[in-house]
Amino acid sequence: MTGDYQPQVKTWENVDFAARRRARKEAKQKRQKSMLYGTIGLIVLVFLVSFLYKQSFGYVLALDDTVVAQVKDKKEAEGIWDDLIQEETQKFGKAVTPSKELTIEKAGKKIADFYAGDELKNLLKGQIGWLTEIYTVKVDGEPFFSLIEKNLVENILEEYRERYNVELDEDVELLSLGFKEEVAVVEELADIKNLDSIEKALDKLNTLKIANSEYEIKKGDNFWDIARKYETSTEELMQLNPDAKPEKLMPGQVILIKLGQPQITVQAVLETTVLESIPAPIKYIDDSSLLTNDRRVVEEGAPGEKEVVYKIIYENGFESVIEALQETILKEPVERVIKKGTRTVLSRGVGRNYGVVAASRITDNYGWRTHPITKVRTFHEGVDLAAPAGRSVFSYASGTVSFAGRSGGLGLAVYINHGNGLETRYGHLSSISVKQGQKVATGTIVGKVGSTGLSTGPHLHFEVRKNGVTQNPFNYI
Ligand SMILES: [Zn+2]
């Protein structure tokens, strides 16, 4: 090993102890040096081997923290991932992002199968979805349909809304045309699998939430019975079936009983101002001089006028709510005053209804009337009591006959003066039984019921005058 150390003849004389000590020291130093190099080499070797060993396990691929594969080539894996994104974006026509995040980490051991090339590509492709910005229509917070373009969604909703727009009269104002439900278009990053085609979206929109309920007409059916059976009204049936003729229902004909409910309700809110008449309030005054059921208008009264603002809500083309928002009275109505008879007993003598004649009914009251023959509005100065011709007419009270004969429109008539300015007159008689100047007692027959003068049929015209002014006869009989 050491070249400079030569064996010498061993004699005590030539032994150089100093040289031998030096040589030993040098040899020891050499040994120490070589041991150090060996240790370094070993350490380097261990590191190298362990590096190569580790290198042989490659990289672990995880999607959202779930290990899916192990690869030798990190660059290849990254390239495949980028290719997948590009291919899908191109295929879809809009930027898409994978639904899961890919992480690549150096592997310390083998924990999954090794993949590469197309096999790796297919593996990754099968494990992920694709996200993009989509527009979802939400009805009351629930997703209804989703499309890729915002303006497509808006157009579809707009068209749907217009379908139920209402035709407006000139004086009706459309306040709003919208949806009853809360309808929102939400932009969100979502899986492209959630997207609908336009056809599918329209289909969803046009499918009724609750189907129409229909009925097939049978022989003998009518709207009234059908309405009662199905707890609706004839008005609603007619509204739902504008083409059906209620009086001409044909067996086999199918009519709509109840309108189905669509997914989205279009609500049109209208406002209109209408002039309306206010009916005159009626005030009744009890009057004991009038017969029960007898009515006498004392004051005609007059209807008033008001302006009413109505809010009308149409739902899917059908009127659903009418509400008066505001009323402005333009003209107050004037009270109509009517006297109401309370008198039940009229007879002054036994068997002598109305005192002066046994009449069946009153055909004309005292007061203003349109004359049945002349059609002229005149004041009726007496009361007309219908009775068969020939029936006896009695004197109202004792007195003197002041006139007996023909008296214009009254025909054959008798006037009796009872004193104290009181006079009674009996008209349209068929015959007269008293003479002028004759004294009569209460109940004396003065003549017979007839239809002479201006008369439409047999009746007694009975008149009471106080100091020459006509009075309501019912205050006397
Ligand atoms: Zn009369």
Image (tube, helix red, strand yellow):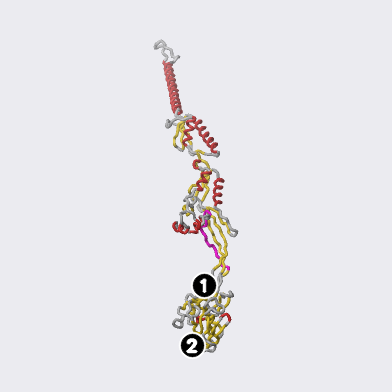
- Residue found at the very far right of the displayed protein: 170
Question: SS at mark 2?
Answer: loop
Density class for disc 2 (Cα within 10 Å; few <14, some 14-19, many ≥20) is: some
Q: Nearer the viewer, mark 1 or mark 2?
A: 2
Which disc, if any, is residue 404?
none
Residue 359 appears at what percent x and percent y? 48, 78
Q: Is residue 430 magenta?
A: no
Depicted 184 relative to depicted 320: above or below: above
Image-based side of 17 in relation to 378, left or right: left
Q: Which mark is residue 441?
A: 2
Asked which secondary structure carries label 1, the reply is strand
Q: Residue 5, located in which quarter of the rendered image?
A: top left
- Number of residues whose C-alpha sits closer than 10 Å to that of mark 1, classed few (under 14), some (14–19) or many (20 or more): some
Q: CA distance from mark 1 to mark 2?
A: 43 Å
Point out the image quarter for the N terminus.
Answer: top left
- Percent position of residue 122, x then y: 48, 33
Per the image, the residue denoted by label 1 is 282
Amino acid type shown at disc 1? Ile
Magenta residues, start to end:
315-330
Can residue 452 be seen?
Answer: yes
Q: Cβ–Cβ below 8 Å for labels 1 and 2?
A: no
Q: Earlier in the sequence, mark 1 or mark 2?
A: 1
Q: Amino acid at mark 2?
A: Ala
x, y (%) of residue 214?
A: 47, 52
Q: Nearer the viewer, residue 274 or 185?
A: 274
Residue 266: percent from left, percent from top: 53, 53
Q: Between residue 415 and residue 106, name the one nearer to us.
A: 415
